[in-house]
Image (tube, rainbow, N blue to C red):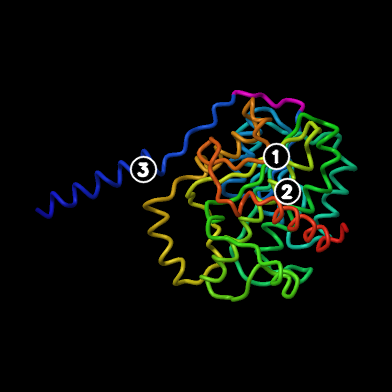
């Protein structure tokens, strides 16, 4: 009887692995010679896998990262594996608005093209940014918001071009509390692992609302934008969590999460797949348009978040 039960459990697990947890591969065969791409947080995880694929396609790939040693190691590995020497590191600390501005200034001065911007970096940790914002809010949303705005003119010049922002299914549990943002410069309060997880969910909702509003502002241009859920992926995003949290999550990740190459597929689909222009502003999952709750496509909230973000970033 026990053997029968165990066999059933294994069968269900394997079925889930090839259905629910399986992520389709990006089908685009696009070549990117002569194109320039920025991938934030590309020194590890999904970002590195995304950069590797883009380099294989011949793109000039900028790894925009905070940690120089890890980024240079990733550059060397990608160059070695693809034979593409047009892969380089540029310093970007999304926890510092000044660093974002310096990156944009340096990029615009030294690079003539920008065809694809992939806002991939994300973290799940407490603390404050250099500007006093909650770390998750500052890095996952504000840093990428400012980076995108500062690079929009170059994207327009080089169109057709795309902005791809990595969100998460966690947006389902998110909300945007503007009173908390205005009072505490954060999306919520608390320092526990659970509180951080809620803040992460809020930031991922911001990613989708940002993309929703960005698409409206880009109408009539040759730039399109997309947000996405990469899937349940084994990355090091939990490295800064407590030991108890990691003890809980590690077995779950081993059993139910898939590899970073799979996690890169929807990012690549949004960046490369032909025929997506009419879907600008949409949210994707498993290389297809996904449904989002009403709060993630609310015009008034998206517009207000944009205006608040402009103010917080010193753009308004």
Pointer 3: what residue? 17
The label shown at residue 64 is 2
Say which of marks 1 and 2 sits in front: 1
Please state which of residues 240 and 219 is positioned toward the viewer in this rendering.
Answer: 219
Marks 3/1: CA distance?
30 Å
The spot of residue 295 in percent (x, y) is 60, 54
Q: Is residue 203 found left or right of 257 in the rendered image?
A: right
Residue in the picture at 90% in, 43% down: 109
Residue 61 visible to the viewer:
no
Nearest to N terminus: mark 3 or mark 2: 3
Looking at the rendering, the stretch of residues picked out in magenta corresponds to 29-34
Marks 3/2: CA distance?
33 Å
Q: Secondary structure at mark 2?
A: strand
Residue in the picture at 82% in, 60% down: 313
Q: Is residue 31 magenta?
A: yes
Marks 1/2: CA distance?
19 Å
Mark 3 in CB contact with mark 1 (< 8 angstroms): no
Pointer 1: what residue? 225
The spot of residue 47 in percent (x, y) is 62, 46
């Amino acid at each position: 009887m026990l053997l029968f039960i165990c066999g059933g459990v294994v069968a269900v697990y394997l079925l889930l692995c090839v259905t629910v947890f399986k992520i389709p591969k990006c089908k685009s065969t696009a070549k990117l010679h002569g194109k320039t791409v920025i991938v934030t947080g590309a020194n590890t995880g999904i970002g590195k896998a995304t950069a590797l694929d883009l380099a294989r396609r011949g793109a000039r790939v900028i790894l925009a990262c905070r940690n120089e040693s890890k980024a240079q190691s990733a550059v060397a590995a990608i160059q070695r594996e693809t034979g593409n020497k047009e892969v380089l590191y540029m310093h970007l600390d999304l926890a510092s608005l000044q660093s974002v501005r310096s990156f944009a200034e340096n990029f615009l001065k030294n690079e003539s093209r920008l065809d694809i911007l992939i806002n991939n970096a994300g973290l799940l940790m407490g603390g404050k940014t250099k500007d006093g914002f909650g770390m998750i809010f500052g890095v996952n949303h504000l840093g990428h918001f400012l980076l995108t705005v500062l690079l929009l003119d170059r994207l327009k010049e080089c169109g057709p071009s795309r902005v791809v922002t990595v969100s998460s299914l966690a947006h389902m549990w998110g909300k945007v509390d503007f009173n908390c943002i205005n009072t505490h410069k954060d999306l919520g309060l608390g320092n526990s692992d659970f509180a951080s997880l809620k803040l992460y969910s809020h930031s991922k909702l911001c990613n989708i609302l940002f993309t929703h509003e960005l698409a409206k502002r880009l109408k009539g241009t040759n730039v399109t934008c997309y947000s996405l859920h990469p899937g349940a992926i084994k990355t090091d995003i939990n490295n800064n969590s407590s030991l108890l949290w990691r003890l809980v999550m590690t077995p779950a990740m081993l059993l139910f999460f898939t590899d970073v190459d799979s996690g890169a597929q929807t990012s690549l689909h949004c960046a490369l797949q032909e025929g997506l222009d009419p879907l600008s502003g949409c949210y994707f999952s498993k290389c297809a348009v996904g449904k989002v709750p009403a709060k993630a496509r609310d015009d008034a909230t998206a517009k207000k978040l944009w205006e608040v973000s402009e103010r917080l970033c010193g753009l308004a």
